[in-house]
Amino acid sequence: MKRIVWIVILLTLPAAAIFADSVSLNRNELTEVKRKLQAVLTALGTPPAGYSKINENFNIATEANAESGGFSPAQSSAEFLFGGEGQKIAAEYQKKIMDAQARGDYAAMQRLSQELQAKVTASAVPEIRIEIIANQSDSITADPDSILLEKPGTMAVATNNDEMDFRAAVYFHPKALSGSSQAARIEISLPESIRTKTGIVDFVVRFTGPADLVKKWISKIQHNAVLSNIDAR
C-alpha cells in the first residue's frame, strides 16, 4: 500500500520538481547580475531636482535550476529609495548626537536635535521608491488611458491614480513588446530554459511616489540602454 502511495505522489509532481538540479552562482556571476541591475538604474536617468538616492537593497539569486540543456531564468531584484537632503542630514546629525551622548554633553545633544529638526523640515520631500526586477513573468492590461509610454520593447503603465502615492510599472521585453501587437492584454512569459545562469529575459521597473515626479522620470528613461542589458534569447 505504501509503495502505491509513493508512486501516485511522484506521478502528480511536475517533471521539473523531480529532475531539476540546482546550480550555485559564483561571485563573479553574482557581480555580473548586480552590475546589470545597476546599469538599469543608470539608464533610468537622474532623479528629480532636490532628490538623491538614500538607500538601496539588492536581492540577487544565488542559484539557478539546470533545465533542458540550459538554466531556468533566475529572478533577481533591487530596491532604491530616493528622498531629499533631509534624510542625509539626519544620518549625519545622528552620528553627532551619539558622539555628544558618549561625552555626556547633553546641552550639545539638545542643540543638535533642534538643528536637525529645523533642517529636515526645511528640506522635506515625498519619497520615491523604485524596484527593478529581472526575469519576471507578468500580464499587462494595456488600457490606452493608463499607458504612460510605449516604444519598441518598452511599455509603461500606471497601476493607480493616487497623486501622492502614484504607482507605475515599466516593462522591458524585446519580443513581447515589439509594438506589433495591439492586444488589450499582453503576456510577459519566461522561457523554460536559457543558455546561462546569469541570463536576463526581461526587466520590470516599479515606481511609487508623487504622480507628477514619477511621470516625468519615466519620460526620461533611456529605454534602449535598459534593453541592451537583456541578453537571454
Image (cartoon, rainbow, N blue to C red):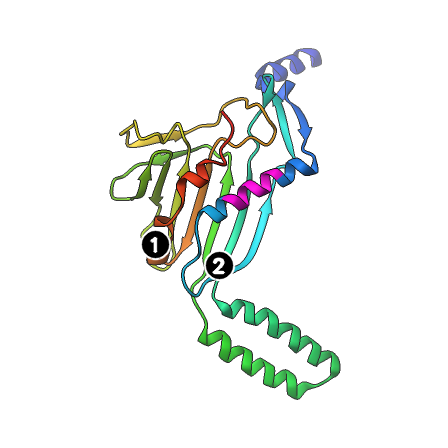
Q: Quarter of the image containing the N terminus? A: top right
Neighbour tally class for label 2: few under 14, some 14-19, many 20 plus, Cα within 10 Å: many
Identified by mark 2, the residue type is: Phe
Q: Is residue 7 magenta?
A: no
Image side of residue 47 versus residue 102, left or right: left
Q: Quadrant of residue 92?
A: bottom right
Q: What x and y, as percent, mark residue 216?
A: 34, 54
Give SS at disc 2. strand
Q: Quadrant of residue 166?
A: bottom left
What secondary structure do most residues of the magenta stretch adopt? helix
In the foreground, 18 or 206: 206
The answer to whether one can see residue 77 in this image is yes
The answer to which of marks 1 and 2 sits earlier in the sequence is: 2
Q: What x and y, as percent, mark residue 214?
A: 37, 54
Q: What x and y, as percent, mark residue 137?
A: 46, 32
Identified by mark 1, the residue type is: Lys
The CA span between labels 1 and 2 is 15 Å
Q: What x and y, as percent, mark residue 66?
A: 63, 22
* For discs 1 and 2, the disc positioned in front in the rendered view: 1
The residue positioned 36% from the left and 60% from the top of the image is: 164
In the foreground, 46 or 215: 46
Which span is picked out in magenta? 32-39
Give the number of the disc on residue 13: none
Neighbour tally class for label 1: few under 14, some 14-19, many 20 plus, Cα within 10 Å: few
Image side of residue 60 versus residue 103, left or right: left
Q: Which residue is mark 1?
A: 216
The residue positioned 57% from the left and 19% from the top of the image is: 14
Give the number of the disc on residue 82: 2
Q: Is residue 172 above or below residue 12?
A: below
Q: Is residue 93 above or below residue 10?
A: below
